[in-house]
Image (cartoon, rainbow, N blue to C red):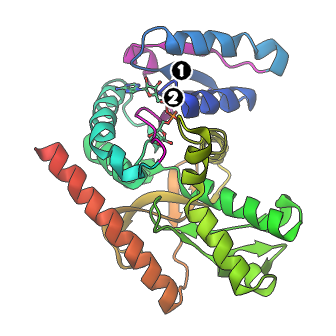
Amino acid sequence: MRNKITVVGAGQVGTTVAQLTAYKNLGNVVITDIVEGLPQGKALDLQESGCLQVFDGIITGTNDYKDTADSDIVVITAGIPRKPGQDRSDLIATNAKIVKSVTEQVMEHSKNPLIIVVSNPLDAMVYVAKRVSGLPSERIMGMAGVLDAARFRSFVSLELDCSLVDVDAMVLGGHGDSMVPMPRYTTVSGVPITDLMNKEQIDRLVDRTRKGGAEIVGLLKTGSAFLAPGASVVKMIEAILQDKKRILPCTVHLSGEYGWKDIFFGVPVKLGHAGIEEIIELKLLPEEMEQLNRSATDVQSQIKDVDNLLDG
Ligand code: APR
């Protein structure tokens, strides 16, 4: 039987996720949105590319959550993106309401899906989906670290004029300005970039990574990044459905790892068929831990804000 992947939100990110999921033959795709006609139009257009891109999946567009029944994976991209000058946290009240209502409707029709949240502010929105769905921690996660690491990898390869394929990167923490790119764990063919670049270069690339989302918002003027975010989600879907046991940074529930509890935070995890199969704890230096704690404090305060919004 084919896997069933539901994408909630037929906007820029949702469409990219649906398209890449179909092109990679990962299963049947359901696209849903609050706007009538939009998911149906996108689904039909994508289905009609099937014979050209050669995929077998059935693509359904719908406004009715009944069509999402028994999904294996649900990707939540519903929400508003930021505008130039806005911080991800400016979206919190609107997107918390949207993610709450979407999660409730998803859970009415799928008993035990794996949920990947993309809506921003990411760490707080994964928390909303967890609180509303009651899913076990290994089945709910946010996409941020794969994207932030992809940005860091791109900047390293451009700076060193070397193949992207050889560059690996690790970015920890919340998906905001206090995220923690990790130069010691960022390598080119196994060689840490701390051996390949000077401090000025590394600081510049770290700063560009932290502001990677805002750089694109500033250029696009309307809407935020969607191609790399969409591709990052599909990397996670592939790891799960094909039980790849990949080690990727994802936003997951911490229960004591890295000294933090009851927050959703970006850390390296093993992704396989069961979802989050292991949380990997890196041995951090005191100054790295300090940065991570700062980021966790930011996330914790956002989670308090959404708790108040949901309770009030
Ligand atoms: N239910 C379903 N879909 C909804 C709802 C809802 N309650 N509210 C909004 N949507 C849909 C919109 O109709 C729109 O089609 O979500 C879609 C969002 O698409 P875009 O505006 O194109 O935004 P996008 O760039 O895809 O970003 C979506 O991901 O990266 C984050 O910050 C970004 O939070 C934003 C999200």
Residue 1 visible, this orientation: no
Residues under labels 2 and 1: Cα distance? Answer: 6 Å
Is residue 73 part of the magenta span, yes or no?
yes
User: What residue span does the magenta drawing correspond to?
Assistant: 55-84
Residue in the picture at 15% in, 51% down: 308
Kindly identify which numbered label has been placed on residue 7. 2
Please, what is the three-letter code of the amino acid marked with disc 2? Answer: Val
Q: Front-most of 161 and 275?
A: 161
Residue placed at 39% from the left, 55% from the top? 123
Looking at the image, is 239 positioned above or below residue 253? above
- Residue that numbered label 1 is attached to: 30
Q: Position of residue 192 (x, y in %)?
A: 75, 81
Give the residue type at disc 1.
Val
Left or right of residue 274: residue 304: left
Please indicate whether residue 309 sits to the left or right of residue 204 in the image: left
**In the structure shown, which secondary structural element does the residue marked by tag 1 occupy?**
strand
Residue in the image at 45% along x and 42% along y? 82
